[in-house]
Image: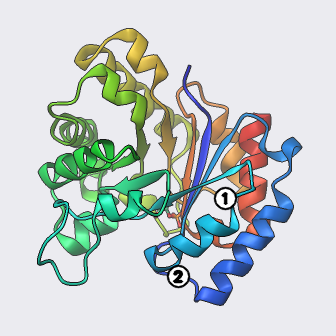
Amino acid sequence: MRRRIVAGNWKMNTTYTEAMALVDGLKESLTEEVVGETGVIITPPALYLSDIVESLVENPYIAVAAQNCHEKESGAYTGEWSAPMLASLDIDAIIIGHSERREYFGETNEACNTKISQALNNELAAIYCIGETLEERKSGAYMDVILKQCEEGLAGFIADDMDNIILAYEPVWAIGTGETASPEQAQEVHAGIRAWLTERFDAETAQDVSILYGGSCKPGNAAELFAKADIDGGLIGGASLNAADFTAIIEARTKA
Ligand code: PEP
């Protein structure tokens, strides 16, 4: 059965001290009642992963992910880090194909496909991000764009692989803009992705894949998004930098 998940993407934010304080805040606020059956993932800057994993060793609720990995296992790629390196830190997952990486670092669907393989080969889950730009939304062809990202990013994977792949639909026009897709707009896309998963794999696999919504999700709009049948949770940017806001979003997921 698919999981309800709320993941926080901290991006290139927080100093070390701020990051550790944010983790401490979450350790305090994420009680059994708040979390329930919701899977909680935080995605701090890579520099802090090791210390954060250590500080969460006894915490039963918070999993840790990285924001990216390189396509190769190792080699002469100054300034980069690989999936085997991340796995050696005992983290749980890697975000792959975030729209900021696609936009600023030229990440293609094919590169994402390789990175997802890297994650899975190293026993890490992949959180694969897909979503259309404002122009693509306005053109009306947004579903074609999203399904192409699914097709190419997930090329070669089999149904069993989908146990370790979470999808995150993040309309680029809603990320960090304060503008959120309406619950109906988001549900339409999530249902379209699930229909594609049914055709590409099978109905059972499609029902079991968690599809998260991302794009200015906050305490004030989380509950109505999570109430939709195919929205299994959220990938949260800005609001995940505040322990109270992130906690409120998790609570909304648990109660919806
Ligand atoms: C994101 O970047 O994954 C995101 C959803 O950001 P925000 O919540 O700030 O729009």
Q: Residues within 10 Å of mark 1 (few under 14, many from 20)?
A: many
Residue 173: quadrant of the picture: bottom left
- Residue at 25 percent across and 57 percent down: it is 135
Left or right placement of residue 77 versus residue 192 in this view: left
Q: Earlier in the sequence, mark 2 or mark 1?
A: 2
Q: Which residue is mark 1?
A: 218
Q: Which residue is mark 2?
A: 13
Which residue is situated farthest in the top direction here?
203
In the image, residue 132 lies at what x, y percent? 30, 51
**Observer-nearest residue: 103 or 166?**
166
Vertical relation: 201 (above or below) 141: above
Tell me the element at label 2.
loop
In the image, residue 194 lies at what x, y percent? 39, 24
Disc 1 beta carbon < 8 A from ligand 1?
yes
Residue 146: quadrant of the picture: top left
Q: What amino acid is labelled 2 in the image?
A: Asn
